[in-house]
Amino acid sequence: MKLARTLMATSALTLTAGLVNAADMVNDMTLVSWGGAYQKSQVDAYTDPYLAEHPEVSITWDESSAEAVAKLRAQNEAGNITWDLVDVTIADAMRLCDEGLAMEIDHDEMLAPAPDGTPASEDFGNTILSDCFIPQIVYSITFGYRNDVDAWNGATPTSVCDVFDLEKFPGKRSMYKGPIYNMEWALLCDGVAKEDIYSTLETEEGQQRALDKLSTIKDQTIWWSAGADTPQLLADGEVVIGSTYNGRLFSVIAEQNQPVSMLWDAQIYDVDGWIIPEGLPEERLARVKDFLYYATDTQRLADQAKFISYGPARASSGPLVGKHATLGIEMAPHMPTDPANAQNIIMMDFPWWADYRDDLDAKFQAWLAK
């Protein structure tokens, strides 16, 4: 099995970079991700098995994905690319690709086919949203809430708009420290139809309308920048409801047994994956390609779902999703794509955010500072 996998990886490298021997690859990599339960799932599903086959390799993790765009811009300007592989959202991947900071790739040459021979580009399908993007997971941003709040008098949130109802659901909130996600929910809960959210946000009036709605809960909100913040704030009782990645909420609910429940209403779908920084030396790029061929195959993406409730980006991985590695519970019902959880979703407009993110980031931070 190890020999077959090595031969496949060598074949992939032959297509992309000429014949590459182990001696032509560096033995260390710096991978960038988000920390917390998600990064641990990557370690369990990808890097630990890879290192078991390649004991000569060492991997350093950097938890700076939330700042990936700014930091890669700075590294590029300094002429010193210190990262080898970076986990980003698709909107950030599009920005990095447009700016020439992420390498364009041929998915069928660099990535393994499905077990039945289906080319990677077909197996990943419409999750390949950029020429520079290597999809890993489909996930969502949604809300978790404490289910033991005395002040709620037995009521529980059923709509995302309950987040804006301080009278019925008093208490501190936690929300992402940026415009993305928040402005969609704000407009939805201010009466804008889902199909009109992004056209409304294109206007100055629409942007102000979203900020005005957020202003109604601003002084009751803790603003987070790390995905692990909301689960910790909920577990500590410092907030009563907060947004974060659905897998982080699964961890605090199912693995930590905290008195927290999931609010799936108006969850916002997103896609996450790898980009390779442009300009890596050939020896570093060769190691990255070898790792990627292994870490993005059908079984590896299915394996990640044993550790966190994110849907694998490959179609061929879906049927292989089974039970949680330690809890023994079926994982499919905890996925954001499960029909029971997906009755009211918002599909993020990724190209729109790639175009507008910088301007709205600046406007949001100015509003936050007032």
Image (cartoon, rainbow, N blue to C red):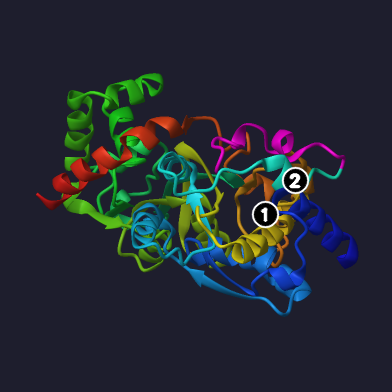
Identify the residue under disc 1: 305
The crowding category of the residue bearing disc 2, from other C-alpha atoms within 10 Å (few below 14, some 14 to 19, many at least 20), is many
Q: Residue furthest left?
A: 370
The amino acid marked with disc number 2 is Ser
Q: Is residue 4 above or below residue 99?
A: below
Please provide the residue range marked out in magenta: 116-132
Identify the residue under disc 2: 317
- Residue 305 position in % (x across, y down): 67, 54
| Residue at the (65%, 43%) spot, across then down | 313
Q: Is residue 314 visible?
A: no
The image quarter containing residue 206 is: top left
The amino acid marked with disc number 1 is Ala
The numbered mark, 2 or 1, whose residue comes first in the sequence reads 1
The image quarter containing residue 31 is: bottom right
Q: Secondary structure at mark 1?
A: loop
316 drawn magenta: no
Quick check: marks 2 and 1 in contact, CB under 8 Å? yes
Please state which of residues 99 and 122 is positioned toward the viewer in this rendering: 99
The image quarter containing residue 316 is: top right
- Residue 164 position in % (x across, y down): 27, 40
Tell me the number on the disc at residue 227.
none
